[in-house]
Image (tube, helix red, strand yellow):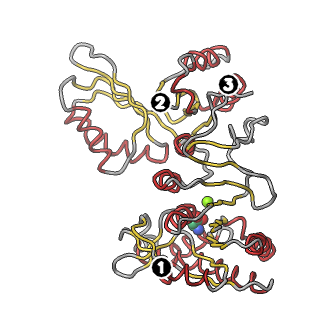
């Protein structure tokens, strides 16, 4: 078997942890498998490098920032190769330039185009464990690029797809994917399996276990991902296309996202093109809009309400204030003390009563819903931030426990 094993920064934070990972990789090697290891930078190295860059130039060029950031992963792979060798097994570390992992040109958010296999396969065939830098690539100028924060997961999946690996294991400091944040819902359960689509919904809703793009890539290439802990031997959670849906299991998780703000545009002129002009201006500045509601017209105006991430609120307001007069928007009201609580499950597709059940749970808990949004596999409500944890627990109790 060919196994790709990815370890995050917390799993390689110091020598002892590196040696622990080295031993785990050697176990698979000794069992006769080919082993490719993908690593993040040690601990909080990447944060440190960014801070260092900003200390000399508050606005570093994206090229130079990538040039600096890729050094973090080079340290961890070289250390790992040394650790594995010290335990008597041949190992080699490679960076993206040596492997030739081609990406698009945009620094800081590059995407993989093609990964060359020759070097990796040669090293594996000569009996080595191959350790590869996560998070980085090279572009058509032969410059280093990075994939965006948390991008090493995506490197692991891209390598598993390119090498036709038999398994792609992503090791982290939690045991797998849970039905809710265990800090909020103490009896949240670890899931044995979850679909790509559910995982994508949960990840974008704040359950930050995997880099979103790694899940998209895994879905595209049909690479099953195993998420498990580097600290114990638990089985973890398998992320894949279809899960065995047991009778009555409708929901796989409840997630709360507090990085949400609502913007209400009141008494907007009721004429064609208004929504286009508003959302086009926001999209041009790469501000994602999530839930959108529009009221039915009254006189010759209507209201448009929507949510953005809280971190984008001030920039969104700046844009909207500039448009206010020309679009005839009477008033702009914002609320950043809200949260989005979502129920996610592939089984929601066929479960007609789920929305009513969720609204009933919130009603019984005395929680008012400000907005509602549903898709095939999720039901989201916007509520007061103060009630987010209570709502999460109540919905979890009703659907999962
Ligand atoms: N070291 C990078 C980061 O901190 C990539 C990763 O950890 O996946 O974002
Ligand atoms: Mg990570």
Dot 3 crowding, Cα within 10 Å, few <14, some 14–19, many 20+: some
Nearer the viewer's eye, disc 1 or disc 3?
3
Q: What residue did someone put label 1 on?
A: 67
Q: CA distance from mark 2 to mark 3?
A: 17 Å
Cβ atoms under marks 2 and 1 closer than 8 Å: no
Q: Secondary structure at mark 1?
A: helix
Q: CA distance from mark 1 to mark 3?
A: 48 Å
Q: Which residue is rendered at x = 42% and y = 32% of the image?
A: 291
Ligand 1's quadrant is bottom right
Picture coordinates of residue 159 (x, y %)? 53, 67
Image quadrant containing the N terminus:
bottom right
- Image-quadrant location for residue 274: top left
Q: Secondary structure at mark 2?
A: loop
Q: What residue did someone put label 3 on?
A: 399
Q: What residue did someone put label 2 on?
A: 376
Dot 2 crowding, Cα within 10 Å, few <14, some 14–19, many 20+: few
Q: Is residue 142 above or below residue 46?
A: below
């Amino acid at each position: 078997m060919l196994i790709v094993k990815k370890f995050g920064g917390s799993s390689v934070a110091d020598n002892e942890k590196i040696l622990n990972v080295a031993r785990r990789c050697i176990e698979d090697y000794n069992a006769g498998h080919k082993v490719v290891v993908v690593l993040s930078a040690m601990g909080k190295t990447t944060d440190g490098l960014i801070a260092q860059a900003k200390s000399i130039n508050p606005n570093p060029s994206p090229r130079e920032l990538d040039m600096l950031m890729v050094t973090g992963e080079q340290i961890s792979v070289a250390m790992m190769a040394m650790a594995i060798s010290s335990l008597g097994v041949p190992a080699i570390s490679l960076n993206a330039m040596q492997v030739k992992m081609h990406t698009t040109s945009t620094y800081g958010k590059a995407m993989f185009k093609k990964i060359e296999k020759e070097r990796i396969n040669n090293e594996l065939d000569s009996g080595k464990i191959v350790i590869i830098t996560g998070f980085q690539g090279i572009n058509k100028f032969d410059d280093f690029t990075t994939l965006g924060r948390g991008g090493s997961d995506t490197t692991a999946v891209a390598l598993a797809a390119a090498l036709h690996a038999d398994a792609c294991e992503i090791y982290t400091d939690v045991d797998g994917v849970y039905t809710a944040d265990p800090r909020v819902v103490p009896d949240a359960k670890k899931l044995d399996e979850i679909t790509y689509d559910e995982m994508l919904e949960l990840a974008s809703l704040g359950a930050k276990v995997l880099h979103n793009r790694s899940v998209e890539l895994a879905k595209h290439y049909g690479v099953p991902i195993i998420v498990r802990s580097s600290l114990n031997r638990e089985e973890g959670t398998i992320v894949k296309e279809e899960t065995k849906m047991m009778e009555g299991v409708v929901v796989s998780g409840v997630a709360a996202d507090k990085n949400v703000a609502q913007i209400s545009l009141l008494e907007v002129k009721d004429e064609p093109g208004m929504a286009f002009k508003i959302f086009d201006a926001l999209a041009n500045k790469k501000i994602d809009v999530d839930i959108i509601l529009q009221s039915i017209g009254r006189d010759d105006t209507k209201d448009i309400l929507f949510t953005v991430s809280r971190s984008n609120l001030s920039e969104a307001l700046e844009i909207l204030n500039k448009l206010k007069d020309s679009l005839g928007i009477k008033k702009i009201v914002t609320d950043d003390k809200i949260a989005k609580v979502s129920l996610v499950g592939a089984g929601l597709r066929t479960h007609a009563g789920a929305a009513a059940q969720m609204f009933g749970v919130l009603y019984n808990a005395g929680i008012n819903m400000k907005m509602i949004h549903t898709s095939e596999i999720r039901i989201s409500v916007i509520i007061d931030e103060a009630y987010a944890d209570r709502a999460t627990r109540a919905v979890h109790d009703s659907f999962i426990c």
